[in-house]
Structures are given as C-alpha cells and as structure tokens.
Image (cartoon, rainbow, N blue to C red):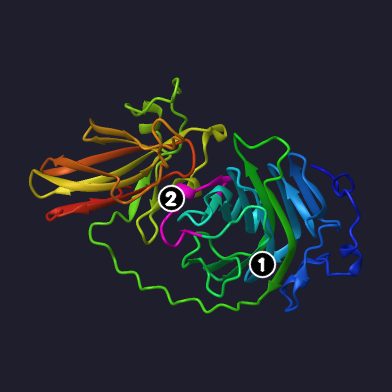
Amino acid sequence: MKTLNTLIRRAPVFAALGLLVLSNPSRVFGAEPQRLDLAAPGWEFSGEDTVVEEFDGRFALRLKSGKATYRKLEFLDGTIEFDLQVTEHRSFAYLYFRMEDDDEHEEFYFRSHKTLLPDALQYTPVYKGRSQWQLYHDAGSTAAAPLPAGEWIPVKVVVKGSQAAVFVGSTEEPQLVVHRLAREPKPGFLALRSFKTFGTPADTYVANFANIVVRPGVVDFTFPVPEPRTPTPGLVTDWQVSRAFAPEEGPKGEMVLEIPAEVSMSSGWRTVPANADGLVEFERHLERPDNARRAAVVARLGITADEAKTVRLNLGFSDELTVFLNGQLLVADDESYSFNSPRRQGLLTGDQLSVFLPLEKGANELLLVVTDSFGGWGLSGRFEDAEGVTVEAPE
C-alpha cells in the first residue's frame, strides 16, 4: 500500500480551500454534500503507479491498473458524483460502493473502449472478490453510454434501497436503471479502480477521476416502480448443492465428466434457493477450495414421473456444464469466456442449452456439474411441458 506523500506530485491549491473531508464516518448521514478531498489523509492507494496531481485543469486521481479506497465513509442511499476521463485503449474504470470489505460490494464499471455500445456501462455484484458480470448483462445491468476519450465526463450514481441509476455525460435521464441490486442494502465505503489490458502503452493512465462528491440521502431521481414478478411456470426455485471442489486441470482445463466420489459421498450437501429470476449465484453461497481459480459444484434435483416420459429442461450456466441423469452422462457443454478463436462472452442466459431428459417411471436423480473459471458462477433451470412430473431439491 502506498502512502499519500509518495503519491501527490504537486500540492494543489484546491486542497487548501477547506472543502469538507470525511474524518468522521457518522457525518456521512447528514444532508450536506461531502467532497472527498484527494489530498487528505484516509485514502489507500494500491496498484501500478497511482498518483494524485493536477491534470487537464483538475486535481485528479490518475490510475493505470490500480485502486484508491476511502474507508472513512458509510454510504447507504444518496448520490455519488465524479468527473471521469478515459482513453481510447481497451481498459476499464470502476466505482465500488456499499463496500462491506474489499471483497464484498456492489460495482459499476465503464468499458472505455466501447463508447456508445450496448455494454459500455455495466452493473454487477461482487462476492468474495469475484465479479459476476456474466450473470448480469440484460437491460437492467448493461447500457450504452458516451465515453469520449480525452474529455472530462460527469458521472452521477443515485442509489436508493435496492435500486440505482447511472447518468453519464450531460443528461437528465439515466442510461442505466438497476431495478434490483443483487446484494442486501447495507452501508459501506467506496473505492475507485481502473484496469488496463494488453495493447495499452505501459505509461498510459487509463482512468482519471476528479471532483468526487458524496451527497448522503439525496435521491433526486424518481425510480420507476418495478413490474410485479409473476412465477415462471416450470422454473426451478431450489437446488441441492455439494461443497465446491477444484476439478483437475488440463492444458486448457478439462470438463468434468465424472463426479469425484469424495464429492458425491460427502455429507456437505445443502439446499440453496434461486432468486426470483431462477438464478443461483454459487459464489454467494460457497467457498472455493484454497480460493481456486477454477472451481466446480454439483447441483442435484429429485424428479418423480408418473410414467416413463421425456421432458425438456432449459438451462443457463456459467461457465461449463455436465448433465447426468440416473448416473448416465447425457451432455457436456463449455461456454466459458474466450477473447478470440472463438470469441465468446460466456454470458449466462436462460436458454443456453435445452436437454431432453428420458425419465423413468418413479424416482429419478438429476446431477449437474457447474464449473467456473472467470466472470461469474451461476445456474438456472426451467422445465417445459412437465405435466405429471414433480421436481424437488432432495434433503
């Protein structure tokens, strides 16, 4: 971790103006706007050559691949504003908020190289330090936004309960409205981060932040009332899941085609509920063994059929899936992220894979192995035309 003295290149005139600093976390619940003075104690800096200096007419936090964390803050609802300047290089700029700790928080991020494209702006929860962006990519999680390189862009984030809105640029309407934040609303601190990828010159600061202001309790946007959720026919609402395990690694990682005996015979099974959309976020519920980069879990259902029949099950998953019915391997599929050759995003959708299950009369056991290596670990399932079939997560 870097100290403030090593990071500030020139003491700014702006810092001497006496703008408020959050030295007392309890003050954040007041109504007064709070400017987070970049020259004040309390910031923690990490990463590659992070500096605070005068830049392009502003006193700015400048990041290559780095992070600036401000823990003297308890933000629940209200508004966060800042100016952002990015480059044309492939890179990412982040706002972390409601941070319970460094690994548990909500985040918005900006894909600097995708200005005006449908996924220039992204929402995702983070569990145990791992982003779940592959599970959150619909109209309530991603949006087009203007990110012109080399210009200061005003950004405003309004948060209220389980909803949030993001305004990018000079606009009266948000580009993105998140109707249901994934995490429970809890107050927390914030951080700013950037990440640059291959092809970016080594000396490039890909994200610059300035004029960071928090307005606790100020919600100046009227959020639309979310549409009531009606139960989706056939949606699987509960799964019994095993403990997580680390599958064997091959040259590119090998799909799990057999369930390890120590997993299937383990007593560590438990029932995990899906959310209202049918999604199970495994990272929220499970601990990876030794924080393994690649981890797998077995999800189990008991299916009782009044007669022998074939039923269709639509599945969404990230990243790999292997399906077993009554001990027999039916199908295995790899939808993991690939930058090119082939290009794959690895996004979870509810109809990625349709499996036709040849059920026996009476009791059947369905086992799904879901493996993750990057970007989100999840599963959803929905039965079609399953008359005469009972599905449950066995105890």
Q: Position of residue 11 (x, y in %)?
A: 91, 55
> Which residue shows up at 28% across the image and 45% down it?
301
The quadrant where residue 42 appears: bottom right
Hey, what amino acid is under mark 1? Ile
Assess disc 2: are there few (<14), some (14-19) or many (≥20) residues with their C-alpha within 10 Å of its C-alpha: many
Queried whether the magenta region covers residue 129, the answer comes back as: yes
Residue found at the very far left of the displayed protein? 307
Question: Residue 98 shows which numbered tag?
Answer: none
> Which residue shows up at 38% across the image and 55% down it?
274
Tell me: 281 left or right of 152. Answer: left
Q: Position of residue 2 (x, y in %)?
A: 82, 43
Question: Residue 80 shows which numbered tag?
Answer: 1
Camera-nearest label, 2 or 1: 1
The quadrant where residue 158 appears: bottom right
Q: Quadrant of the N terminus?
A: top right
Q: Position of residue 202 (x, y in %)?
A: 70, 35
> Which residue shows up at 34% across the image and 53% down it?
238
Secondary structure found at label 2: helix
Hey, what amino acid is under mark 2? Leu
Tell me: 204 left or right of 364. Answer: right
- Of the pair 393 and 171, the residue shown nearer to us: 171
Q: Which residues are magenta?
A: 127-144
Q: Position of residue 14 (x, y in %)?
A: 87, 64
> Which residue shows up at 72% across the image and 79% down it?
31
Q: Which residue is mark 2?
A: 135
Q: Is residue 192 above or below residue 155?
A: above
